[in-house]
Image (cartoon, grey):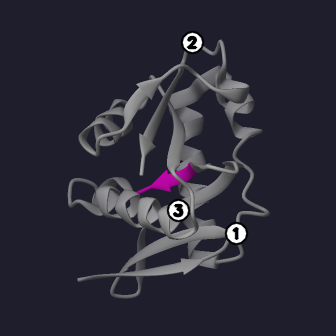
Amino acid sequence: MYSIIKTNSDNKAFQQLVIELDKELAIRDGDEHAFYDQFNKITTIKHVIVVFEKEIAVGCGALKEYDTNTMEIKRMYVPLDKRGKGIASMILKVLESWAKEMGYSKCILETGVNQPEAIGLYKKNLFTVIPNYGQYTGIENSVCFEKVL
């Protein structure tokens, strides 16, 4: 059984999961990791969820306001040994619901072409590919998605 907490980026379990995420992304992104890393600082994220299995953190995700109608989904992560159990889809659903509760009408996100599992996850959860936005415009290794809530 899983429990989910809503918190912020000060949460220690979230911070530890992000360290694991960044290690994985450094390998997947290779030489481009520094470019992506600059957009993934967590010091001021106000809307974070952490999923626990008993007392162990097994997943996280965050929301960051992109504009007055749109939340950007950030820092999605489930450790490798916990994947394939529906945790990431659960995280997405909670983030979407939270964004909608706060009055936002859309969620957007960016992932990399070297993350085929993430691309599959977002498509499975009815996110659609959109032109790259913001800092990802023109970046060939980025894939951007949106979902109207």
Q: Nearer the viewer, residue 42 or 128?
A: 128
Main secondary structure along the magenta-highlighted residues = strand
Tell me the amino acid under the disc marked 1: Lys
Name the spot of residue 67 as percent of width and height, x first. 70, 46
Q: Residue type at mark 2?
A: Glu
Q: Nearer the viewer, mark 2 or mark 3?
A: 3
Q: Give the residue displayed 64% in from the left and 77% down from the top.
A: 12
Give the quarter of the image for residue 86: bottom left
Looking at this view, is 51 or 66 the one in front? 66
Residues 61 and 93: in front is 93
In the figure, 134 relative to 147: above or below?
Answer: above
Q: Residues within 10 Å of mark 1 (few under 14, many from 20)?
A: some
In this picture, which residue range is highlighted in magenta? 73-78
Numbered disc 2: secondary structure: loop
In this figure, which residue is indicated by the disc labeled 1?
A: 46
Q: Is residue 75 a member of the stretch shown in magenta?
A: yes
Q: Earlier in the sequence, mark 2 or mark 1?
A: 1
Instruction: Please tell me the numbered disc located at residue 99.
Output: 3
CA gap between label 2 and label 1 equals 30 Å
